[in-house]
């Protein structure tokens, strides 16, 4: 997920709340995560970790610190975030080399560290959550605060992130500026515990769905025939997806990622089938490139 919004809109706060929405680690996951942290020398007290990791490295972090490396080829932040969340704030401020190094682990769920004295493979199946300002000054949509280079500055700033990296992000979410009046009114909306219950129910449904297989354990890991088996939309949904794929110039990766997101949306909706509305919502989260219409009739 990539959150885009002006400074102070609450992007970092939202990201920090995500671990509380995730279900607890299973016994197998807890052992796997604890072993990685033990290898990295970050297992406090020698006890098994029970909470999903939340890692938020600074944007000045080097590529080896993110993907792993060093003399002893230790795991990096992406492996320490295994089965949890990797939060990258100020996303475009990370070096281009570091961001591109994330592409392969995002696809395979593993990272290979090759050194002269060792070749080590570490698990790296994490949820990438990133946040960024729409432009360097951060106030692209506010004419009173925007710099004199808008909107060119936004194109240049967002251009620091490659198209293939954008293509690997399932959810592109605009986070609007907070109205000062909202800060003085009573908070509304659901509590995190309520949302966490829905997430746990959807995850339990996925665990049951894949319990008979030795492959994926959740929708995000499904691929190939497994994805087709669980995420085939109805006729209206497939027609919408086909039309959108042409208009939005979706890659094969983008097409399959929409199916995964739609399957999860349907799970949260307690629907056995993927309907047109689930496909429409999944499409609404995709990034629309300049000059291409997001509207699908």
Image (cartoon, rainbow, N blue to C red):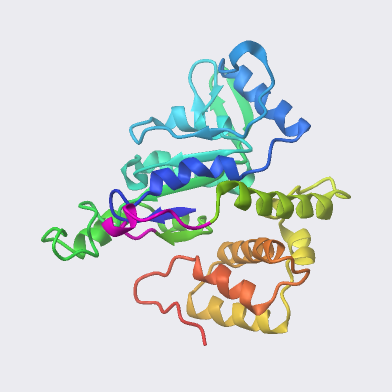
Residue furthest right as drawn: 212
- At 30% across and 52% down in the image, what residue appears? 133
Residue 110 picture location, percent across and down: 62, 38
On screen, residue 231 versus residue 113, left or right, reads right
Q: Quadrant of residue 113?
A: top right
Residue 249 picture location, percent across and down: 49, 74
Residue 133 among magenta residues: no
On screen, residue 168 versus residue 122, left or right, reads left
Residue furthest top as drawn: 45
Figure check: 95 above or below 148: above
Is residue 101 among the parts visible in the rendering?
Answer: no
Residue furthest left as drawn: 148
Residue 136 picture location, percent across and down: 23, 51
Per the picture, the main secondary structure of the magenta-coloured stretch is loop
- At 78% across and 68% down in the image, what residue appears? 272
Figure check: 191 above or below 141: above
Figure check: 261 above or below 71: below
Residue 177 among magenta residues: yes
Is residue 134 among the parts visible in the rendering?
Answer: yes
- At 30% across and 57% down in the image, what residue appears? 134
Nearer to me, 256 or 81: 81
* Boundaries of the magenta span: 175-189
Residue furthest bottom as drawn: 297
Nearer to me, 222 or 280: 280
Nearer to me, 249 or 124: 124
Residue 4 picture location, percent across and down: 37, 56
């Amino acid at each position: 997920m990539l959150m885009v919004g002006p400074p102070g809109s609450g992007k970092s706060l939202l990201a920090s709340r995500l671990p509380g929405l995730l279900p607890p680690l299973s016994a197998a996951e807890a052992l796997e995560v604890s072993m990685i942290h033990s290898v990295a020398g970050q297992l406090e007290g020698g006890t098994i970790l029970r909470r999903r990791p939340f890692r938020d490295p600074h944007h000045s972090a080097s590529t080896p610190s993110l993907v792993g490396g060093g003399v002893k080829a230790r795991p990096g932040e992406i492996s320490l975030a295994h089965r949890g969340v990797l939060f990258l704030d100020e996303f475009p401020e990370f070096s281009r080399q570091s961001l591109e190094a994330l592409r392969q682990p995002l696809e395979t769920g593993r990272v290979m560290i090759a050194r002269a004295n060792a070749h080590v493979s570490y698990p790296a199946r994490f949820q990438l959550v990133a946040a960024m300002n729409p432009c360097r000054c951060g106030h692209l949509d506010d004419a009173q605060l925007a710099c004199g280079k808008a909107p060119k500055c936004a194109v240049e700033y967002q251009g620091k992130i490659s198209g293939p990296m954008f293509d690997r992000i399932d959810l592109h979410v605009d986070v609007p500026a907070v109205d000062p009046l909202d800060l003085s009114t009573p908070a509304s909306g659901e509590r995190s515990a309520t949302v966490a219950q829905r997430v746990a129910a959807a995850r339990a449904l996925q665990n049951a769905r894949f319990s008979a297989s030795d492959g994926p354990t959740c929708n995000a890991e499904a691929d190939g025939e497994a994805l087709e088996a669980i995420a085939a939309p109805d006729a209206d949904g497939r027609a919408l997806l086909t039309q959108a794929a042409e208009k939005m110039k979706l890659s094969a990766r983008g097409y399959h990622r929409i199916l995964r997101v739609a399957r999860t949306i349907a799970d949260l909706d307690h629907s056995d089938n993927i309907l047109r509305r689930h496909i429409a919502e999944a499409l609404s989260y995709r990034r629309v490139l300049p000059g291409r219409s997001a509207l699908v009739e």
